[in-house]
Image: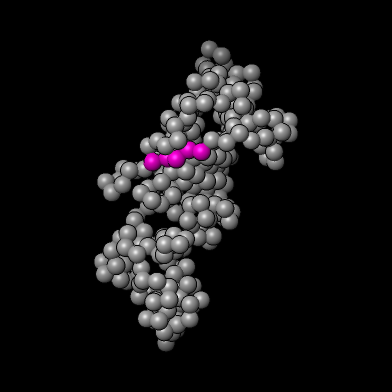
């Protein structure tokens, strides 16, 4: 005997079916929560719980003050280790753009250890948030010593490369890049910024770059939603001649 689905699951199944069959179109706003609660004869908390199921599946996007919308399929992101770049698969629906906010800050918390500087050392933070249409896609916080900070970083771009290019103009050539990758739950701030469920894991990448003197010239904290991200690393095996100094 099949178990009877809960009201929450039954509502989620019905809306999911309407989305999959095209009765509710991609990008379309769902009826208000009050209207849906009346339609399904449930309380508002039960209705919100059903919508939370769809949000965690990536089918519905809740925008504060505007309502619930059927999500466009999320573009896949590939993080290329070593090259320190993000690649997004092409999409005919909407272009991927990056907004950049520049702020002068002082070294604190983990930044002291990552950059190898004393507390309150002057740094510049570049907060980069990529958007697909109106929906946030990924975020990165890049920190550099103030003396290596360019003043003409664009506030909006179609990729992160323009930001990296501006940073490279002032810093010496990189001699070492260290990357640490882990999967973890998103912080409350990240769930709001990226509009993702708190149940969705994110790929957190910490990247530290140093010059030939050993000075750390950049520390980057990247947060990539787990439902659309993969990391790609290539190891180049040294030959015997190179190993022996030949």
Q: How is the image coloured?
A: one colour
Residue 146 position (above or below residue 136)? above
Visible residue check, residue 102 = yes
Residue 30, position in %: x, y? Answer: 36, 68
Question: 77 left or right of 239?
Answer: left
Magenta-drawn stretch contains 180: no
Q: Residue furthest right?
A: 119
Residue plotted at (42% across, 62% down) = 66
Tell me the quarter of the image containing the N terminus.
bottom left
Q: Quadrant of residue 39?
A: bottom left
Q: Residue furthest front?
A: 65
**Camera-nearest residue between 194 and 173:** 194
Magenta part of the chain: 97-101
**Camera-nearest residue between 47 and 181:** 47
Question: 118 left or right of 73?
Answer: right
Q: Quadrant of residue 60?
A: bottom left
Residue 188 position (above or below residue 169)? below
Report how many numbered discs are placed on residues in the image: 0
Residue plotted at (66% across, 30% down) = 122
Question: 186 left or right of 58?
Answer: right
Examine the residues drawn in magenta and state their main secondary structure.
strand
Residue plotted at (37% across, 37% down) = 158
Visible residue check, residue 232 = no
Residue 87, position in %: x, y? Answer: 40, 39
């Amino acid at each position: 005997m099949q178990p009877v689905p809960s009201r929450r699951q039954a509502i989620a199944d019905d809306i999911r079916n309407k989305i999959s069959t095209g009765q509710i179109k991609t990008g379309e706003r769902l009826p208000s929560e009050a209207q849906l609660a009346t339609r399904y004869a449930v309380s508002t908390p039960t209705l919100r719980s059903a919508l939370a199921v769809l949000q965690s599946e990536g089918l519905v996007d809740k925008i504060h003050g505007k309502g619930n919308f059927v999500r466009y399929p999320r573009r896949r992101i590939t993080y290329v280790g070593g090259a320190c770049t993000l690649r997004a698969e092409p999409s005919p629906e909407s272009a991927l753009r990056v907004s950049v906010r520049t702020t002068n800050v002082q070294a604190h918390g983990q930044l002291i250890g990552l950059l190898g500087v004393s507390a309150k050392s002057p740094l510049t933070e570049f907060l980069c948030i990529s958007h697909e249409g109106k929906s946030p896609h990924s975020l990165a916080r890049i920190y550099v010593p103030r003396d290596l900070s360019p003043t003409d970083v664009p506030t909006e771009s179609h990729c992160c490369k323009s930001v990296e290019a501006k940073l490279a103009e002032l810093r010496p050539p990189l001699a070492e890049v260290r990357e640490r990758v882990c999967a973890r739950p998103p912080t409350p701030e990240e769930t709001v910024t990226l509009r993702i469920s708190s149940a969705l894991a994110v790929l957190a990448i910490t990247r530290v770059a140093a010059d030939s003197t050993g000075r750390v010239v950049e520390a980057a904290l990247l947060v990539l939603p787990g439902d659309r991200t993969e990391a790609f690393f290539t190891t180049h095996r040294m030959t015997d001649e190179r190993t022996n100094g030949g």
